[in-house]
Amino acid sequence: MTSLTRLDCGKLHGDLGMFEEGSEGLVTLPVNAWLIHHPRGTVLFDAGMPSSFTGETDRTKKISEFLRIDFGKENTLGAQLIANEQEPEHVDFVVVSHIHFDHMGGLSEIANATVVVQRNEWEANTTGDQDPDTLHPRKDFDLGHKLMLIDGEHDLFGDRTIVCIPTPGHTIGHQSLEVRLPTCAKVVLASDCCCFARTMDTAILQNFAFDFDEQRRSLAYLRKCRDDGAIIVPGHDIEVVGQLPKVLK
Ligand SMILES: [Zn+2]
């Protein structure tokens, strides 16, 4: 039977205006990864933050200029997997929504997993020289994992239970994940296509994106899924996350 478990990979705190242009005040953003048990394999959606963020480094100092990192040793991907009775070395696949530090940072902790990512997202981040000051360095994600580079929609096990859906805009090859569970509605893990639940209606986006218009077109897909009865899980909405059961079946 397929199940979906939320992993608590820490929090980020910062100005709301960064994640919802024009808004004021502070916001707490939960960082999550999602563990899916399927009869044919164990799958993660996203990988949280790098374990090095539990201490202070040059990189965390740079990030701390605009986001406060709230990330204990218990929040690393490896610790969260073990706390949920999953051996990290036995994760078969990790679907990466996009190559940002709060979504792919823990890949080094699941060395045996096949990384499933949109080809254009991978190529945009591995072609040419990276800016030495990037917040999303190649050493976090280009680690020699088996790679499954996909082009558009991809049904992971061929039974429609776990389906990658391209939702580009926030980044060039951003993707979301549809999960069909036996006893509840279709769940769509939206990641940063949709920061908060309200984003689907306001279409007020983060103040940074690869293509804002494309992101709004991707939001329309999420809105349609919601209106058809799906549960949409936004990327960083603490209220939605707080209301979800820890495990969905
Ligand atoms: Zn994010």
Image: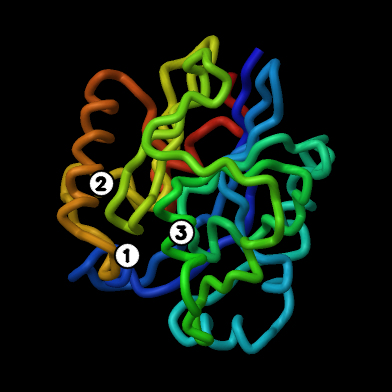
Decide if residue 213 is on the left or right side of residue 1: left
Provide residue 128's location: percent of width, then percent of height.
47, 74
Q: Residue 142 appears in which quarter of the rendering?
A: bottom right
Q: Nearer the viewer, mark 3 or mark 1?
A: 3
Q: How many marks?
A: 3
> Please, what is the three-letter code of the amino acid marked with disc 3?
Glu
- Compared to residue 167, the image places residue 65 above or below, namely below
Task: Say which of 13 and 117 sits in front.
Answer: 117
* Mark 1 neighbour density, 10 Å: few (under 14) some (14–19) many (20 or more): many
Write down the residue under mark 2: 198
Alpha carbons under labels 3 and 2: distance apart: 32 Å
Question: Where is the N terminus found, in terms of image quarters?
Answer: top right
Write down the residue under mark 3: 123
Q: In terms of secondary structure, where does tag 3 sit?
A: helix
Residue at position x 60%, y 83% from top? 59
Which of disc 1 and disc 3 is earlier in sequence?
1
> Please, what is the three-letter code of the amino acid marked with disc 1?
Phe
Provide residue 98's location: percent of width, then percent of height.
46, 54
* Mark 3 neighbour density, 10 Å: few (under 14) some (14–19) many (20 or more): some
Which of disc 2 and disc 3 is earlier in sequence?
3
Q: In terms of secondary structure, where does tag 1 sit?
A: helix
Decide if residue 192 is on the left or right side of residue 184: left
Q: In terms of secondary structure, where does tag 2 sit?
A: loop
- Compared to residue 104, the image places residue 35 above or below, namely above
Q: Residue 68, labelled with which disc?
A: none
Residue at position x 40%, y 53% from top? 120
The reply to whether callout 3 and callout 1 are in contact (CB within 8 Å) is no
Q: Residue 19, labelled with which disc?
A: 1
Residue at position x 47%, y 83% from top? 131
Provide residue 8's location: percent of width, then percent of height.
63, 50
Question: Where is the C terminus found, in terms of image quarters?
Answer: top right
